[in-house]
Image: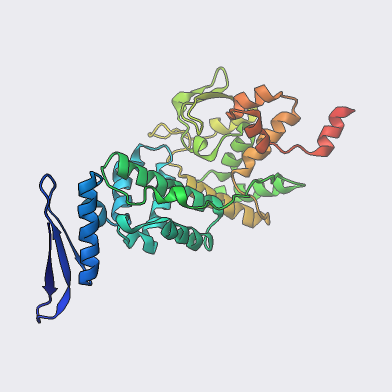
């Protein structure tokens, strides 16, 4: 049975209507609306769902904003992920958007589509897709683990994803490597806390990812066998990376930190910024630290290693994935042909 009550402010002016629904076997439900017609429509829908056995308590969903949902996600879910640091920054972008102020119960695909379009004006499609992935997982966790009722289901499932066309084939050309290392060595002399020149050399010799390099520990290095164990990788599988003589020399030049990390307290974002400054000083455009992985992988092929050997070093799981990171120069292949 539904009942309706006027809601008034301190001056006695009507500010809305409160609807209350009481039905045996169900918890009492109440909600306030601007007009009585809206209150009556809501009460009728609730009663109908109860009669059909389709009613579910949406009070928590209605009382929770997306911002509050993301903050809980950051506390309970994000810390368990390998890429927690990167996910925090993506979650912050969501929290800074107006969609975070909306009740979870009122968010539909039109709202997440607007979020997508707003973000595409500021960041790349791949970044937007990462943020949509986080939103999708947050909605799924809320429904499956936290018992929140999503009226329209997971809205991200009905949100068109932006097309990502950011595959890169950037390699070092001409004297770029020499100029880059000279600029990086100058930077090291100015601030030895960031051994950017040695980081560049090591990346070119190992084809390792930025995060893998930052996480290296001394106990994972077998100096006698010249092998580095990478226990945690992007693919979830550990691998062993053979170390060239140059890579060994770089490691031997590093001081031993109490933390046990080979590169000390190295943060990926700081590494990227230092690399960007070195590129700017060297007059090199459109080069990222991750491009060194492309360069190193291609050089492994140019040294004559077969795909299986290269994959064991780089950690690529399929030949197709390996192909994305490999860009051989036609002139170098011509030399192999004789």
Residue at 58% of width from left, 39% of height from top? Answer: 198
Between 290 and 108, the residue placed more toward the observer is: 108
| x, y percent for residue 268 | 48, 45
Q: Is residue 123 visible?
A: yes
Q: Please state the total of marks drawn on the protein image.
A: 0
| x, y percent for residue 75 | 29, 45
Q: Quadrant of residue 13?
A: bottom left
Colour scheme:
rainbow
Q: Is residue 190 visible?
A: no
| x, y percent for residue 280 | 63, 57
Apparent side of residue 20 relative to residue 310 in the rendered image (left or right): left
Residue at 53% of width from left, 63% of height from top? Answer: 121
Apparent side of residue 262 relative to residue 301 in the rendered image (left or right): left
Q: Could you tell me which quadrant the N terminus lies in?
A: bottom left
Q: Could you tell me which quadrant the C terminus lies in?
A: top right
Q: In this rendering, is residue 144 above or below 241?
A: below
| x, y percent for residue 52 | 24, 46
Residue at 37% of width from left, 48% of height from top? Answer: 153
Q: In this rendering, is residue 192 above or below 227?
A: below
Apparent side of residue 49 relative to residue 308 in the rendered image (left or right): left
Q: Quadrant of residue 44?
A: bottom left
Between 27 and 80, the residue placed more toward the observer is: 27
Residue at 20% of width from left, 48% of height from top? Answer: 50
Apparent side of residue 333 relative to residue 58 in the rendered image (left or right): right
Q: Residue furthest top?
A: 225
């Amino acid at each position: 049975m539904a009942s309706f009550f006027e809601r008034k402010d301190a001056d006695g002016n009507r500010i809305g209507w409160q609807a209350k629904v009481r039905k045996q076997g169900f918890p009492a439900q109440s909600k306030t609306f601007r007009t009585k017609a809206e209150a009556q429509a809501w009460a009728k829908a609730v009663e109908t769902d109860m009669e059909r056995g389709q009613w579910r308590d949406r009070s928590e969903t209605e009382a929770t904003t997306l911002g509050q949902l993301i903050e809980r996600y950051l506390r309970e879910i994000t810390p368990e992920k390998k890429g927690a640091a990167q996910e925090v920054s993506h979650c912050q972008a969501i929290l800074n958007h107006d969609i975070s102020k909306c009740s979870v119960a009122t968010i539909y695909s039109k709202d997440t589509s607007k979020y997508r379009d707003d973000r595409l004006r500021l960041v790349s499609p791949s970044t937007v897709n990462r943020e949509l992935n986080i939103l999708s997982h947050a909605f799924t966790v809320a429904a499956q683990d936290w018992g929140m009722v999503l009226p329209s289901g997971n809205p991200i499932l009905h949100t068109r994803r932006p097309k990502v066309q950011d595959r890169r084939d950037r390699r070092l050309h001409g004297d770029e490597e020499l100029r880059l290392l000279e600029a990086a060595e100058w930077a090291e002399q100015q601030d030895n806390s960031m051994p950017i020149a040695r980081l560049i050399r090591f990346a070119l010799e190992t084809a390792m990812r930025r995060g893998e390099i930052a996480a290296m520990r001394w106990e994972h290095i077998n100096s006698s066998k010249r092998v580095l164990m990478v226990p945690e990788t992007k693919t979830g599988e550990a691998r062993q990376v053979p170390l060239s003589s140059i890579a060994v020399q770089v490691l031997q030049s590093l001081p031993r930190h109490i933390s046990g990390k080979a590169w000390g307290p190295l943060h990926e974002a700081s590494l990227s910024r230092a690399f960007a400054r070195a590129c700017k000083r060297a007059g090199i455009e459109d080069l990222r630290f991750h491009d060194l992985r492309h360069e190193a992988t291609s050089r492994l092929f140019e040294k004559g290693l077969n795909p299986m050997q290269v994959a064991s070093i780089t950690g690529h799981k399929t030949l197709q994935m390996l192909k994305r990171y490999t860009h051989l120069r036609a002139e170098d292949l011509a030399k192999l042909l004789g």
